[in-house]
Amino acid sequence: MFDQGAEAHRRQDQPRLSVVAGADPATPEALLHRTALGEDDAFAALYDLVSGRVYGLCLRIVRDPAQAEEVAQEVLVEVWRTATRFDERRGSATAWITTIAHRRAVDRVRSAQAAGERERRAAAESAEPEYDQVAEAAAGRLEHRQVRRCLKTLTELQRQAVTLAYYGGHTYRQVASLLDAAVPTVKSRIRDGLIKLRDCLEVSR
Amino acid sequence: MTTDEHTLIGAWALDAVDAGERELVERHLDSCASCAQEAAELREAVARLADVTIAEPPPRLRDSVLAEVRRTRQEAPVAAPGEAPESARDRRRRAPRSRSGTHRAHRLRLALGAAALAVVAAFAGVFATWSVMQQPGGEGDGSPIAAVLEAPDAEVAYKEADGGGRVTVISSDSLDDAVVVVSDLAAVGDDRSYQVWMVDEAGQVSAGVMDPGDSSATMLVEGLGDTQVIGVTNEPAGGSAAPTLPMVADVALDA
């Protein structure tokens, strides 16, 4: 009943995630590997490559620039500290770093919520990413457009659920309550929405 | 695998689950290769959502991060499968203990070998002879559990649990590993899980969570470090980030 659908299973036999650290020494993977060997300059180069991504995501989620800076610092130090545990067979360096950033930012928001400090409304209204001029000025304009275009291929409920959860830092139960939808429905829409997003991003790559 | 854990993969990829659900999904992924594949793909897609939030951090962040990094020690890598056991263990010994619980899936494996289980059961009451394990071709042969049981310095400790049952710990300092046998604890519903903790002076870290509703299990705990007590608590299904007291059983390890 959670319509996992044919597309959910269609691709399982196509492992595509292993990113081979190629000859280019400036890929995030190569820099992360050198970081794992304790090379400060590789980490500095990695910082220059990903700090905008880490800080921007933290800022989107926690909202307060001072706190975003704190969380971004925690994230980047964690990247240094745990670079030894990065396994490129399990995903790209960028995804690995982004995952750490998102989790840290969400943890910050949730502990603030638990302490009753947070205005839920602020997160709810800002869940939909606005057109971000700073982001547009940054690198990755093409990717930027792809993500926006692919988000548009989702149904309204899928898109709302995914963006509220990701940019708003909400749990799927909170998303269900914000959208006044059934919890199992939201859980399923998140999953099939992400599958659609994955397929769209891959096709347009 | 249940439908529930599987449909949670999407929410998990977005960090839109609570701590217990996260644990549940990650344990599920450990045991289901195709699910892990799907999860990894969704994580890649989700990471792309951050393409649209890129923002320039204040320039002082760079100095501040690089300065902190200079005084921050890096973690030891996770031992690769197939690596020589001794070097793997040496590394683990040097590894700072993770208190976050992020890596706890790597610290514990539920053991399924019936032979090993039977052997451990024999230890649960009395000190049996180590030769019991030397059965040629037995399932326990060469397994990490058998290695602990066969270690010359293996120590056995146990404690009767509140509400019935017993927790037995066979630990080896030289291997830095222990086998924990949880047997016949008070029955719990499917909404509760027994959780095993390693406790030392600095606090506790989860060593693993038993399947919801289960009251018996045999598990390998790797990287004992300075663990003084192996504790078991009764938690919501999937486990908790911090133990719910009182403990059901606490087994003191010999110093």
Image (cartoon, helix red, strand yellow):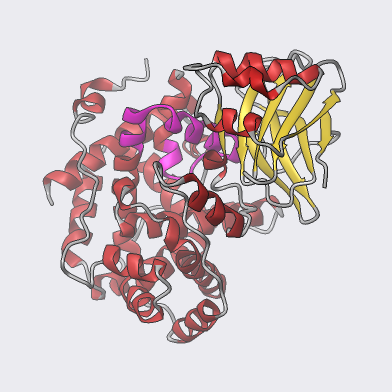
Q: Give above or below for B6 relative to A51.
A: above
A105 with respect to B195 (left or right): left
Residue B78: image x %, image y %? 47, 51
Q: Residue at x 52, y 62 (%)?
A: B75
Q: Which residue is most to the left?
A: A204
The secondary structure that dominates the magenta segment is helix
Residue B9: image x %, image y %? 41, 33
Q: Give above or below for A88 relative to B13.
A: below
Residue A75: image x %, image y %? 49, 65
Mark count? 0
A107 is within the stretch colored magenta: no
Q: Residue at x 19, y 67 (%)?
A: A141
Q: Residue at x 70, y 34 (%)?
A: B196
Q: Residue at x 56, y 26 (%)?
A: B110
Nearer to me, B9 or A163: B9
Nearer to me, B127 or A6: B127
Nearer to me, B255 or B54: B255
Q: Is residue B48 visible?
A: yes
- Give the residues drawn in magenta, as a range: B11-39
